[in-house]
Image (cartoon, rainbow, N blue to C red):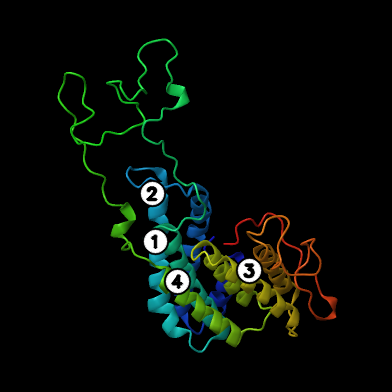
Amino acid sequence: MASSEVDMKFLGQFAANIQGDHPLLAQSLFQIFGNLTMLSERVIKARKLRRLDTTRDTKSVDLYCRIIWYAREGLKLLEEYVLPMVANYGELKVLSYKLRASFYHLYVLFHNQPPVTLRSGNQVSTPPGLTSPRKADKGKGVDRGSPSSPYRPSSVQPTHPLEGGPVGGQPTFRHAPVEFAPNFLVPAADYRPIALTCFQEATKLAEKHLWGSHPLRLSVKVEFAAFLYDCLHEREQSRRMAKATIAEVYNAAEGMDDEMFEDAAQLVGILGKMMKRGLGSGGSGSTPGPGSSGHRATPGPQGRDQFAVPSPGMDNPI
């Protein structure tokens, strides 16, 4: 998701609490809340697709268009109607700057130029001269996959606009691939530098206004670490940030209610997994925590390790 459940929870609370004193700001926050609600399901679905063919109209293209549109509208609401009005709010200011970074994070994931790949092998292509086993000659008819055959395999698209017509008939004209549809919503560009700057600003505000175990501060660090790993490929820096954030939680002396404690425990569980992300099951020298079992993060004072157990099923930190 672009924003965690913690962000949504605090956003709804802030909008309800300031509705009487600042109705315009509250209205903008409620609109952003609805925007994120619509985004969450689509982002989760899109992260499972990751193979996008922009040369033809597919469901994935429509999904990406909707994500970019929602991100653009949410970013516009934030920058024009929220950020100028939250200077005197501590927690709300941190959340607003964090959400701005989240929207740019979506630009990087789904509309960056050059594209950001989360894993290798997104595209599968057949080298020239090789045929698919399913098109091999079985003794019936002509081997259409052979390079010497006058026929083309059906999986190869014509390279010339006049190719592909019926035999003995008129040629079929093919138009060149159109521009990727979301480009008319947001220009295709490299959004990684501005996203990095937004995350850095949100992190500074979180460290200034919130204590180490505050769920909003942890939410900022979780998505920032994911951005470093997935988009900038700074894997070691991402793991160091996760480890340092967990240490800050253990060193925090401020108290919190049960609900905030549960939110913090869930986020630290995600950080615990991110701390070992990419190291394999055996870990390495940079794996924090005593021993090599990998079940605990860096222990805090007074032996508190209740945060160190990762939450099950959190494969994707965003």
Dot label at residue 239: 3
Residue type marked 3: Arg
Q: Position of residue 251 (x, y in %)?
A: 74, 82
Dot label at residue 195: 4
Determine whether the residue tagged by mark 3 lies in a helix, strand or loop.
Answer: helix
Instruction: Pick the quarter of the image with the N terminus.
Output: bottom right
Marks 2, 1: nearer the viewer: 1
Dot label at residue 62: 2
Residue type marked 2: Asp
Marks 1, 3: nearer the viewer: 3
Which one is earlier in the sequence, the residue at label 3 or at label 4?
Answer: 4
Q: Quadrant of residue 209?
A: bottom right
Mark 1 and mark 3: Cα distance apart in space: 24 Å
The residue shown at (59%, 73%) is 221
- Mark 4 Cα-neighbour bin, 10 Å: few <14, some 14–19, many ≥20: many
Vertical placement of residue 186 versus 120, above or below: below
Mark 2 touching mark 1, by CB under 8 A? no
Mark 3 and mark 4: Cα distance apart in space: 19 Å
Which one is earlier in the sequence, the residue at label 2 or at label 3?
Answer: 2
Determine whether the residue tagged by mark 4 lies in a helix, strand or loop.
Answer: helix
In the picture of the structure, the residue carrying the numbered disc 1 is 112
Compared across the picture, whether 220 is left or right of 309 comes to: left
Residue type marked 1: Asn
Q: Position of residue 212 (x, y in %)?
A: 67, 81
Residue type marked 4: Ala
Mark 2 touching mark 4, by CB under 8 A? no
Compared across the picture, whether 314 is left or right of 182 comes to: right
Query: From this viewpoint, which residue is outermost toward the right?
Result: 302
Marks 2, 3: nearer the viewer: 3
Mark 2 and mark 1: Cα distance apart in space: 17 Å
